[in-house]
Image (tube, rainbow, N blue to C red):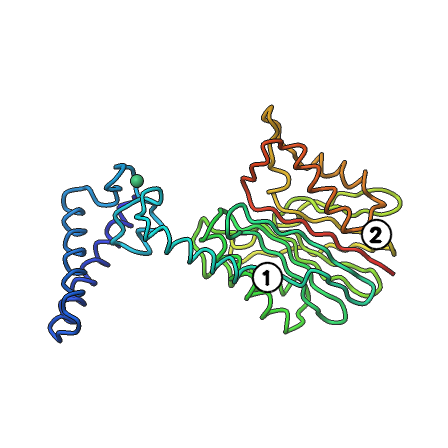
Amino acid sequence: MASTEISYLRDELELRRKRLLDASANNVSAASLRELLTNVDAALSRLKTGTYGICQECHESIEADRLLCDPLVRFCLDHLSPEEQRALEKDLTLAAGIQRALLPRADWSIDGWEAHYHYQPASLVSGDYCDLIESDGGFLFLLGDVAGKGVAASMLMSHLHATFRTLAEQTLPLHQLIEHANRLFCESTTAGQFATLVVGHAKPGGKVEYVSAGHLPLFHISRTGVKSREATGVPLGMFCATEFPVCELALAPGDKLLLYTDGFTEMFNAAGDEFGVGRVHSLAKQHAATEPEAMLTACLDEIRRFSETGKQKDDLTLMVLHRTN
Ligand SMILES: [Zn+2]
């Protein structure tokens, strides 16, 4: 662990020690307080002897983010007691339920448009962000990927969800919407935390404005072919003051947009080849005339065939927007 983190944890432990001593002076359930005080003292003595942050079972380092949440942790994730393991699983199941409830409804449609998506976390919770919000006669579509995986990423995902839901109510022009969201995200995260994201505004006549903040190319599928649209700016949360150029597309009736996260492109086959953006492009061409739901199914079938082992390493989200008329 970095020395700044160690000194932060030492201060936190000293603070807990003082609070426990204050509380025991008032003699509130003294036995459990005494036990906590013993644990805090043991942690402080581990800091002195240099064994702090080492798992007492396997003697490997304990995950730094867990120590920062709870400085009394003594075991790595692999060596939790059955009781701790059950508590963690319960928390994660609850978090997964909360996250599922944040997703837009599955049969989403609005004046001339329909949207379909597939949201598949690599474990219980996901760092992928997917939302559809009615706005100004049309709707906003959002698909993103928070750096990292697991609980920390899923918390940032719900943070993004709340930010965009709140900002969407103000019906701001797209460049202002994303610049506000970027500043808020930047101010509430640390340097290594950012998100790649596509945010777009689809309107009744088929006009689409979008910003791609460092995200993978999106595909515009029309009768005349499949066009790839590259990122237009840096990821969200990387620089507090930055501009995000807005691009425009015109979708004819029947046209589709395909968006996805890197759980789709970063699948590997038995030979170690990556699925890659090129294969997504081919898939989009191959299924250009397919209905959106069938297109999603075809994409999922294809990566299942490709990866063989079927082991999903990263969170996976796919979204197809369809201009119906
Ligand atoms: Zn361990």
Disc 2 crowd rating (10 Å Cα; few below 14, some 14-19, many 20+) is many
Instruction: Measure how far apart labels 2 and 1 are at the Cα level.
Output: 29 Å
Judging depth in this view, the residue of 179 and 321 nearest the camera is: 321
Q: Quadrant of residue 307?
A: top right
- From the image, tell me which residue sits under label 2: 255
| Residue that badge 1 annotates | 179
Residue at x-position 62% and y-position 31%: 308
Point out residue 160 in the picture as x, y percentages from the top left corner: 55, 61
Q: Amino acid at mark 2?
A: Asp
Cβ(mark 2) to ligand 1 < 8 Å? no
Question: In front here: 233 or 144?
Answer: 144
Residue for point 77% across, 41% down: 284
The N terminus appears in which quarter of the rendering?
top left
Secondary structure type for disc 1? helix
- Residue 187: x %, y % from top left: 46, 61
Q: Which one is in front in this view, the residue at disc 2 or the one at disc 1?
A: 2
